[in-house]
Amino acid sequence: MGTTDSAPLIRACWLSWLVVETVDQTEVVKALGLMDVRDTTWADGVELIDEVAHNEKKPFSTVVITPPVQGWTLVVGPYFGLPYLSQTTHVTDLCRKLSALFGKAQLFFHSEQNDGEAWLIAERGRILRRWISEYPELALGEPSGVERRLLDAYGITGKPEDLDPDGDLAGEWAATWGDCWATTVAEECSINPTTAVMSEGRPLIADAPPFEQSHRPSRRGRR
């Protein structure tokens, strides 16, 4: 897993996380309505993150909350996975509401299996950008930052969701996700948990609240 007691790195085959601009871990837990909150060790927390990502029966049941990291608090688990179609609308709305409370809130999904990347950037109650590489039709807002710079480098002057899916540019961009991973965007916008040095404080484990949904696939609902 590449962790140490003082500087763990968070890794998973499919890594989904929420990051909120606050050092108040307790208020984030309260705002999310998390239940049965308990302490854990970094070693156990990081191991659980990967276990939950592989859990076919209850992938959205458990999350890990980090201590504050460089002014942000992370909540990690498939519950926050944008490409899981049963979650997309719910976590998008949740992130928007959290940004209204805390100023900034963001969602990210990174696959070490090279089968998708996603991010959502929200500020003060507004969604600035949502991109899900497997579902370009679900994109919202305008590309900015590293996404915009890489699009320009590929010669894409507009948005990737507007490209002809059968065209050369769309094919070139999709072939490697444009070298624009969620971790790349997170590195620029907030926290990349796969490289950031985490706090020596103790993380928490909690049960995620249930919500109404039309379907719950065992794996991401890929096209």
Image (spheres, rainbow, N blue to C red):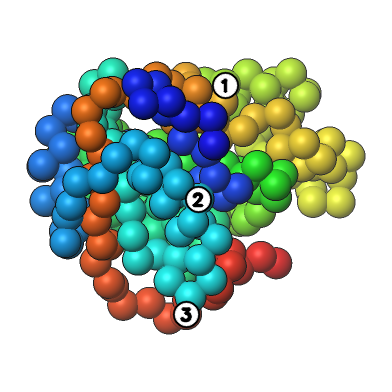
Do labels 1 and 2 touch, CB within 8 Å? Answer: no
Q: Which amino acid type is shown beneath numbered disc 2?
A: Asp
Question: Horizontally, is 174 left or right of 98 in the view?
Answer: right
Asked where in the image residue 72 lies, by quadrant, the reply is: top left
- Count residues near mark 1 (Cα–Cα under 10 Å), then give few for <14, some for 14-19, many for 20+: some
Query: Who is closer to the viewer here, 135 or 126?
Result: 135
> Who comes first in sequence, dot 2 or dot 3?
2
Horizontal and vertical percent for residue 179? Answer: 71, 28
> Who comes first in sequence, dot 1 or dot 3?
1
Horizontal and vertical percent for residue 124? Answer: 23, 35
Count all numbered tags in the image, as a single digit.
3
Q: Residue furthest bottom?
A: 214
What numbered label is drawn on residue 50?
2
- Count residues near mark 3 (Cα–Cα under 10 Å), then give few for <14, some for 14-19, many for 20+: few
Label 1 and label 3: CA atoms lie apart by: 34 Å
What numbered label is drawn on residue 146?
1
Label 2 and label 3: CA atoms lie apart by: 23 Å
For the C terminus, give its image quadrant: bottom right
Q: Which amino acid type is shown beneath numbered disc 3?
A: His
Horizontal and vertical percent for residue 47? Answer: 45, 47
Whether residue 116 is visible here, answered yes or no, is: yes
Question: Horizontally, is 205 left or right of 189 in the view?
Answer: left
Q: From the image, tell me which residue sits under label 3.
A: 215
Q: Is residue 149 above or below residue 221?
A: above
Give the SS element for disc 3. Answer: loop
Give the SS element for disc 2. Answer: helix
For the N terminus, give its image quadrant: top right
